[in-house]
């Protein structure tokens, strides 16, 4: 038996770097388009593409709960449907609840991680994952850091 371990590096900012401001603006706008009458939790995602285009997404719920979709997948699927020739450089996430920006990072669920990692592989280009809250922003340089031992065949 061998005992192995993984080390994950990530950056923590107490002040959002200026370069992320356009993504913050888009992700906030997207929280306002969330359809979340069941959870009352509005998630906004902004995806930065290789030519600088920013594509947004928000969580879209349904009364048949599993039929809804997370903000990350709405954003990234929309990007791939509309700009299939452009790679995804970054994804920025935040949430609003009760009209206030949630002061806690929103980290992608497992299903979104699996989707995002396949987008990374499809374009052979790491996707930076930016998890925003007003008091801190956490940045991972690749989805691989969020999903070791991803499913693949
Ligand atoms: N949600 C997202 O949009 N992204 C995530 O990574 C986790 C959860 C949504 C799904 C649902 O509409 C609401 O947040 C509460 O779970």
Image: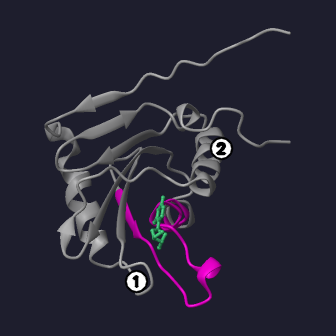
Residue bearing mark 2: 122
Is residue 121 or residue 44 the one in the foreground? 44
Q: Residue at x 79, y 42 (%)?
A: 152
Q: Is residue 110 magenta?
A: no
Compared with 97, 2 (above or below) is: above
Residue bearing mark 1: 35
Compared with 71, 47 (above or below) is: above
Asked if ligand 1 lies within 8 A of label 1, the reply is no
Q: In the rendering, at what x and y percent does residue 69 appear? A: 55, 72
Instruction: From the viewer's perspective, tell me whether residue 125 is left or right of residue 43.
Output: right
The residue range painted magenta reads 54-78
Compared with 60, 131 (above or below) is: above
Q: In the rendering, at what x and y percent does residue 40 appear? A: 36, 79
Q: In the rendering, at what x and y percent does residue 49 appear? A: 41, 49
Image quarter of the C terminus: top right
Image quarter of the N terminus: top right
């Amino acid at each position: 038996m061998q005992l192995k371990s993984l080390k994950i590096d990530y950056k923590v900012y107490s002040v959002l770097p200026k370069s992320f401001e356009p993504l913050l603006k888009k992700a906030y706008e997207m929280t306002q388009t969330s359809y979340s009458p069941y959870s009352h939790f509005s998630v906004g995602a902004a995806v930065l593409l290789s030519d600088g285009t920013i594509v947004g997404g928000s969580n879209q719920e349904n009364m048949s709960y599993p039929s809804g979709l997370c903000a990350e997948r709405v954003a990234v699927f929309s990007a791939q449907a509309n700009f299939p020739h452009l790679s995804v450089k970054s994804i920025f996430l935040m949430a609003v609840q009760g009209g206030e920006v949630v002061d806690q990072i929103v980290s992608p669920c497992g299903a979104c991680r699996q989707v995002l990692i396949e987008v990374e592989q499809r374009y052979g280009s790491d996707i930076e994952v930016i998890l925003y809250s007003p008091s801190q922003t956490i940045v991972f340089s690749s989805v691989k850091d969020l999903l070791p031992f991803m499913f693949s065949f």
